Image: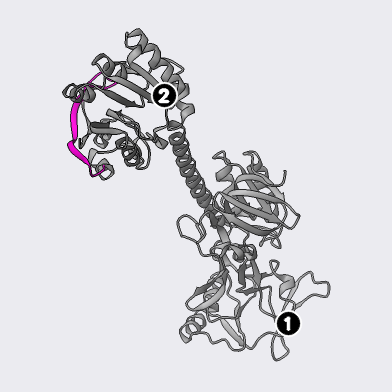
Amino acid sequence: MSDEMTYDVVVVGGGAAGLSGAMALGRSKRSVLVIDAGEPRNAPADHAHNYLGREGVNPLELLEIGRAEVAAYGVEVLADRVVGLSGEVDDFLVTTAGGRRVRARRILVTAGVVDELPDVPGLAERWGIDVLHCPYCHGWEVRDRAIAVLATTPMAGHQGLLFRQLSEDVVVVVHDGVELPEEETEKLGAIGVRFAYGTPQEVVATDHGDALVGLRLVDGTVLERDAIVVASQPHVRADFLGPMGIEPKPFEMNGTAFGSVIEVEPNTGATSVPGIFAAGNATDIAMILVASAAHGVRVGAWINAELASADAVRAVQARRDGFFERPAWEERYSGDKVWSGKVNVQLAAEAPALAPGRALDIGCGEGGDAIWLAQQGWQVTAVDFADAALARTTTHAEQAGVGDRVETRRVDVRTFEPAGETWDLVTSHFFHLPDGGMPDVVRRLASAVAPGGTLLVVGHHPDDLATGLRHGHTSFMFTAEDLLPAVPEDFVVEVCEARPRTQLHPHTGEEIAIADAVLKVRRAG
């Protein structure tokens, strides 16, 4: 892996959520790098439960299997720690403790949480062994055993209620300063839960630490127990997100804080910063292993969908940019014949009423309009920005016997300046620009019209979209009315309309109704 390599997605954290998100992305042919510090939350546990198809699997073994599975889809896994994140959507820079620098279009944060435990001596050493927190993750394994529930918050009654389902011997040890709601204590008492009051002095284990003995209570006695249940305070690992403006938010239930999470949009996993997503316990501390994995898949799918949309938008822009640039038209006019060679119908309809003089034909293509005008007695300047088009116009004019009446020039009408030169007729047929660029063209063309001369601009009308002929052309179609603000004050509007006509559908051969946007204006003489 080389520094500054760019991936579609960098996943921060290689737990169940991160690897599942990477799986969804890898199977969608995305380039993915998972950066994992090797500190899974469930590492102390020997077994993971409620994971359908993997019931009882060792958590570390599950991650090893997952890494092998995602690797089959091209996902890379790097053992390192993310220490820095900067940049913006489509160009994030990720730095690691090992000195790696990689770039990513999107970031998926699944770094999980760190459990903060009550300050009871000996408690942390037995975390994940016989100090437990979740009845769904570990409850079955301590069924019918002697259990102590540490009431460190007023919500501890909930744990007592759930573990009482699993054992008849449950004691709730209420820490100093904690008051359980009277309704909770009444319910627990009614189902046989006992109570002890005062913060325990220590967790007592056998001399070699291989087994739990119980809790030493405030009076010095030892409450013998097989398991201790405690609500930890999980805090999300998110220091590297601070410079991006993402700070952990308190996770609360019934007004009681239970740690911190990254706030995300519920459906997509999107954070407040575009391009940065989060999944798993980093967003909801209540998620068990299978829920974190499922969330990772869902958020990975949303990221892929966002990237797919962004790729399509970029392709559209590239197509637009290419379509309106010279190389594309040089290539087009270097191949087979493009147009029919016949005069455009609106030019044939409007020009006969005008006295022949000098004409400027914009975007002459293969010369159909220029040759027709020359045959009607006009002296024509045919312009295009593609040399291949001008060469064809010259050849066709000579073949038609009007080569002496058709002059060609290479001109990009987007920057066209007549420099005082004028024509009696300036005509533009089906020349289009994206994103509202045509009014500027009309201003430029109007400056080239001689006093008493005519400007005729014809284009595809937006109503043609309904015919299915103009796929992908919505941004550069226009109405005649769209062009009016660009017409100088010394011009008189003679035609401004959507003019209907018929055309054969190129695929079905069926005659269909379409409309041309027609603007004809005359400069005062």
Q: In the image, what residue occupies the spot 63% across and 49% down?
A: 103
Residue 189 vertical position relative to residue 164 in the rendered view, above or below: below
Q: Is residue 521 above or below residue 177?
A: above
Q: Is residue 506 magenta?
A: yes
The residues colored magenta run 488-512
Whether residue 494 appears in this view of the structure is: yes
Position of the C terminus, as image quadrant, is top left
Q: Which residue is mark 1?
A: 202
| Residue 431 at x, y percent in the picture | 34, 31
- Location of the N terminus (image quadrant): top right
Which secondary structure dominates the residues rendered in magenta?
A: strand
Residue at (65%, 69%) from the top-left corner?
A: 115
Looking at the rendered structure, the kind of residue marked 1 is: Glu
Extreme residue toward the right, this view: 208
Residue 347 sits inside the magenta stretch = no
Image depth: mark 2 or mark 1 in front: 2
- Check disc 2 and report its element: helix, strand or loop: strand
Camera-nearest residue between 75 and 360: 360
Is residue 54 in sight in this rendering?
no
Tell me: residue 247, above or below residue 48.
below
Q: Residue 253 vs residue 124: left or right?
A: left
Residue 64 image offset from top left, x and y in percent = 69, 48
Q: Quadrant of residue 68?
A: top right
Q: Is residue 430 left or right of residue 170?
A: left
Q: Which residue is mark 2?
A: 409
Distance between the alpha carbons at the discs numbered 2 and 1: 94 Å
Disc tally is 2
Instruction: Estimate how packed mark 1 is, as few (under 14), some (14 to 19) or many (20 or more) residues with alpha carbons within 10 Å.
Output: some
The residue drawn where x is 46% and y is 36% is 321
Q: Residues within 10 Å of mark 2 (few under 14, many from 20)?
A: some
